[in-house]
Amino acid sequence: MKEGFKMIYKKISYLLNLFDLSFKNVLRRKVRTFLTSSSVMIGTVLIVVMVSLGLGVNKWLVDEISTQTDLKLVTVFPPQTAIMSLFSVLGASDKSENKEKTNWKSVILSKETVEEFKKIPGVFSVTPVMQITVDAAYLEGSNVPISRLFTESIDFEQNPYYVKNVVAGDPFALNKRQDGVVVTTFFAGKAGVLEEDYNSLIGKKVTLVIPTKVAPTGFFAATVESKTIDVFIVGVIDVGLRSEDLFLNTERAISILSEAANLSKEEFLNNVGYYSVLIKTYSEKDTERIANTIEELGFKTVTAKDYINMVNRIFSTVQVALSAFGIVALVVASIGIANTMVMSIYERTKEIGIMKAIGASRWTIRLLFLIESGVLGVFGGFTGVLLGYVLDRIGDFVAFKVLENSGIVIEKLFYYPPWLALSCIVFSFFVGVIAGIYPANRASLLDPVVAIKYE
């Protein structure tokens, strides 16, 4: 047992002596060490800043989605809805194992379908949503049109998370007023209304220009005929990351769309159906099961988890691309380390010869040079991590000030987890060690007799 401990003690002492000697050799020429490790530092800074930026934006988006989206919510679309094409491309749809092609023309979110959804175990509530194309809107007191507005109808009482951030008025009054409208801060911004004047919007008339006949010309359909309707603002809300401009009363929205299609309300709902349906579950655990059940019926679903997975998938790719710049810089830095270590061999040839003459093995010489090159990498990695942290904090301050003026509050745009700093230092060490393999082998193969005579 004692012999075993003695052996371990000797090996540890051996390694500590090599590390001590390596540090002394590296610090012997401080300017060269600084210049060589600076290239590693630049690469490390690039990796730290780029990756922390990607992580920060990713974390902010995921937090915003988690905060602004009900995690118990399943949004159902007919398969022909345009938004589902985007989610299909990003791999966020087709949850069910049933991949048989469905005749989408027969899959409609009708009134009868909504009633069927209510019977699914675990469903708490089902809210139909309509979407209306609004070519332009005129705010009372202004002749300037506000164009291309994203307009929906929704029951705020069934989905209160939509109105978490009420800015002015009473959005819940929309359920009782068919001539009411809830506007968002996006709409207010387009109308040129300042934040301090949001309360003045309550009660104002908004004239909406709604197309009733369109011609499919070009990428966008051109309006051939349109009608105007007057609605009155009952509330102003901040929808965060969502992009809605206006919210109409659901019954009013159905009336507008059915009239434009020359159908009765019943005919419209049975033949065209709702734009989407919001299904609230009793528990977050039920969302995936219910989403899969609905997908098997031929519909498409989106949950908060889908949005989060999509964001994570996109930013994983972005982070790899951003990290590539730093990795390229570190590869270039490794060439500098190799060059420095080769120069060190020429300067210390006699010293290497003496070490071999007094008993140093080839492995000892090789290990000594590998540790020295690794130390150069660690110096660069450590300083790069510190400088990257400082730049991240400066970036946070600048981003906060700039984005605050745009109404976006991000306290930390750069997310700097401990594992990032540690992995950068470890990676820098291995970059140095790999760069030192050739010089270390070359030094270990020197003939001690020739080396001692070298001048």
Image (cartoon, rainbow, N blue to C red):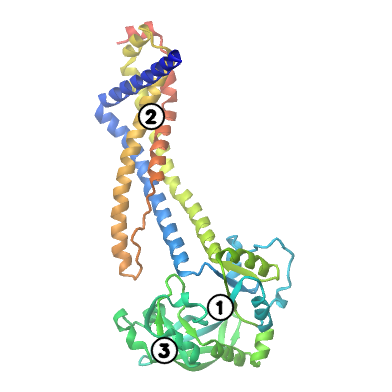
Sequence-first disc among 3 and 1: 1
Query: In terms of depth relative to the viewer, which is nearer, 280 or 223?
Result: 280
| The C terminus sits in image quarter | top left
- Residues packed near mark 3 inside 10 Å, few (<14), some (14 to 19) or many (20 plus): many
Indicate whether 168 appears above or below 287.
below
Q: Residue at x 50, y 56 (%)?
A: 312
Q: Label 1 vs label 2: CA separation?
A: 60 Å
Query: In terms of depth relative to the viewer, which is nearer, 206 or 249?
Result: 249
Indicate whether 250 appears above or below 434.
below
Q: Going by the image, does 441 lie left or right of 96? A: left
Q: Label 3 vs label 2: CA separation?
A: 67 Å
Q: Secondary structure at mark 1?
A: loop
Residue named by callout 3: 233
Q: Is residue 122 visible?
A: yes
Name the kind of residue labelled 2 in the image: Gly
Residue named by callout 1: 220
Query: In terms of depth relative to the viewer, which is nearer, 165 or 345?
Result: 165
Residue 408: % across, % down: 36, 68
Q: Secondary structure at mark 3?
A: strand
Name the kind of residue labelled 1 in the image: Phe
